Amino acid sequence: LLFLFTREIIRTALWVFIVIGVLRVSQVHAVGLGEYQSTEQGIEAYQNKQYPEAIQGFGNAQASDPSNLIHSLNLGDAFLRSGAPDQAAPLFQEVMKARDINLAARGAFNLGKTFEAQSNFEEALRAYQKGLDLLAAADEKQKPDSEIRNRIKHALEKADQQKQQQKQNQDSENQKDSKDQNDQKDQNKKDKNDKQVKAPPKQKPKFKPEKLSEDDAKKVLSQLKEQEKKT
């Protein structure tokens, strides 16, 4: 693998605590009434698994305050839940720039989940590693979180399977190329042999009767007269 997790890193993941679900902006700082109401509408829809409505609510909240990365996190989570990881990824990448280490780490872990949804397990591992690094840098004690540990293990297994499958596919492709080359050589040899077998035989020069000389003609006529006398 291009990216490897050690047992120590996986053990570290036991101490990761990431709140499941979306965040309420009122828990962080005061916001405008419209922004607050849009967020609450998004949360209610999200909890009821009405993800298109959640996207609309969180999108309105983000439009009210684009600098509030909690809105980006919530909107990305709703996109991810709705089956749109391509739209979720750039939002989580933006969240990873947050000054709040826990918020940035959460963006990294959600980005890892996004890559998993895209079956890009090596990138998922990189994102999870980034989240662990952020929390380690914060040097804060965290409650254990089994989801992150399980996701890291799952991504490790899947990344290893992908690498093995890619190697098998490459070996199979190499064998096919080698077989095609050998088949082409055999065909070229066969074509050459066929040309040799089917080549028309060289024609013998046709007999060209020589023109009789005058003396030879007289001789033949003389012999004919002699034969007629005998009969």
Image (cartoon, rainbow, N blue to C red):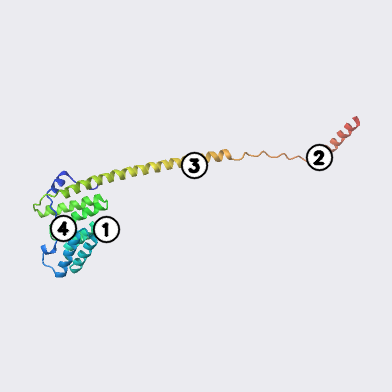
Residue kind at label 3, given as amino acid type? Asn
Disc 3 and disc 1 in contact, CB within 8 angstroms: no
Contact between marks 4 and 3 (CB within 8 A): the answer is: no
Q: Do the residues labelled 4 and 2 touch (CB within 8 Å)?
A: no
Which of the marked residues, 4 or 2, is nearer the chain's N terminus?
Answer: 4
Q: Where is residue 34 in the image (x, y as percent from the top left)?
A: 16, 69
| Residue 175 spot, x, y in % from top left | 38, 41
Q: What residue type is labelled 1?
A: Asp
**Left or right, 180 with reference to 128:** right
- Front residue of 70 and 228: 70
Q: What element carries label 1?
A: helix
Q: How far apart are marks 2 and 3 (CA)?
A: 57 Å
In three-dimensional space, the C-alpha distance between marks 3 and 1, rounded to whole angstroms, equals: 50 Å
Q: Which of marks 4 and 1 is nearer the N terminus?
A: 1
Mark 4–mark 1 Cα distance, whole angstroms, equals 19 Å
For the residue pair 206 and 111, the one nearer the viewer reads as 111
Q: How far apart are marks 4 and 3 (CA)?
A: 63 Å
The mark found on residue 104 in the picture is 4
Residue 188's disc is 3
Which one is nearer the viewer's eye here, 145 or 95?
Answer: 145
Give residue 49's quadrant in the image. bottom left
